[in-house]
Amino acid sequence: MSINDFTPLKLFITGPTYIREEVREAGTLPEFGHRDKENEKRFKPIMANLKKLAKIDDGYEVVIFNGSGSTAMEASIRSLVAGGETVLNVSVGAFGDLYHNMALANGKNAVQLKFGPGRAIDLAEMDRALREHRPQVVTLTHNETSTGVVNDIEAACDLARKHGAMPLVDGVSIFGGADVRISQARPAMYSTSTQKSLGLPAGFGIAFIAPEAVEKAAGVADRGHASDILKQLDRAAKFQTLTTPNCTLANQMCVQLDYIVNQEGVDNRFKRHALMRDMVRDWVAGLDGFELFAQEGRRSPTLTTVRAPQGLGSAGLKAVKERMRARGYLFDPGYGKINTALEKGGQRCAFRVGHMGDITPDMLRDYLSDLEEVFTTIK
């Protein structure tokens, strides 16, 4: 098998996402020793630029996990939910469900507050759940990748704290595409990853950890090894990872974060994502039979979920995927489990448009034009 056997596609899925040529080239830079001074040349600027991108104060520390955003999320459960405590997992979709399943898999006393697909957190309902279950920890999804819903994470974290609960936040598919306002929301731990709005390959989970989390973790038993945030923080203080990192990805991450912070500019990046969200909104408004899926006012800046016309079910969307593949694109026919449930309930299926990372408005405009043409050919 050779490189010619692989089909190059422009990714408009919700991650992995498009990688800039300069970032690809950075993958050819030399390996390095992860306990050598060469490591600090990469990870010191990486951690500094992550803080700039997050707009956090000095109270939060950054940890780089080998793995994914899920790795960081599971570490938050292992390290910050003590035995005998209750964790309330607030879910607006598949990845909120994932946080709940992680808690159960790790033997935690977990209860779930679940909202229907396309709905954001209803604070009144969350308040009732907090009063009923009296949890010590609450998990929240900032940006639900399966539905394109973005939650008011500041309000949700504030509500959790009013009930004496420590908030943990999954920000996997929004970090790098919008101002996530960690300093204002004040989660104990905010988890994200490389392969979505940062425009990098998969391979690292990222966490922003507050001092209260460090204090809490010291009293939590059975934190594991790689999931122990205290062990992770010990190495992070030296600009290192706890276990051997993907050196290729570290080289790419160092180059990409420097570009984001010092060339594109953080606020310019956020404005570009907001512009692309609005472009998709306007595109949908101009099509007959199509409709935005996520709740109005709570639509993601990094991906948009769209209800397909009546009669265009999951099979039709898969046909669209193959016709778009022939045009050089990877189309996202929607989150499988959600579409299965929608079809069973007699509702229209939904597809997703990823507009995150380094996708540009011009790239998106061309994609939507081709996609519109393909939709006209599907019966």
Image (spheres, rainbow, N blue to C red):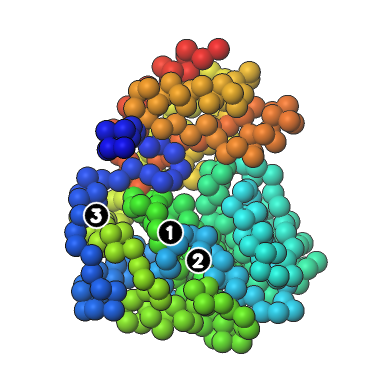
Quadrant that contains the N terminus: top left
Residue 109 seen in the current view: yes
Sequence-first disc among 2 and 3: 3
User: Given this view, does label 1 or label 3 mark the residue nearer the observer?
Assistant: 3
* Label at residue 157: none
- Which residue is label 1 attached to? 193
Which secondary structure lies at badge 1? strand
User: Could you tell me how far apart the alpha carbons at marks 1 and 2 are, in whole angstroms?
Assistant: 8 Å
How crowded pointer 3 is (Cα within 10 Å; few <14, some 14-19, many 20+) is rated as: some
- Which residue is label 2 attached to? 72
Residue 362 placement, left or right of 97: left
Residue 164 placement, left or right of 55: right
User: Could you tell me how far apart the alpha carbons at marks 2 and 3 are, in whole angstroms?
Assistant: 24 Å
How crowded pointer 2 is (Cα within 10 Å; few <14, some 14-19, many 20+) is rated as: many
Question: Between 274 and 53, which is closer to the camera in this rendering?
Answer: 53
User: Given this view, does label 2 or label 3 mark the residue nearer the observer?
Assistant: 3
- Name the amino acid, label 1: Ser
Residue depicted at 29% across the width and 74% down the height: 34
Marks 1 and 3 close (CB-CB < 8 Å): no
- Which residue is label 3 attached to? 27
Which corner quadrant of the image does residue 102 belong to?
bottom right
Sequence-first disc among 1 and 3: 3
Residue depicted at 47% across the width and 26% down the height: 321
- Name the amino acid, label 3: Gly
Marks 1 and 2 close (CB-CB < 8 Å): yes
Sequence-first disc among 1 and 2: 2
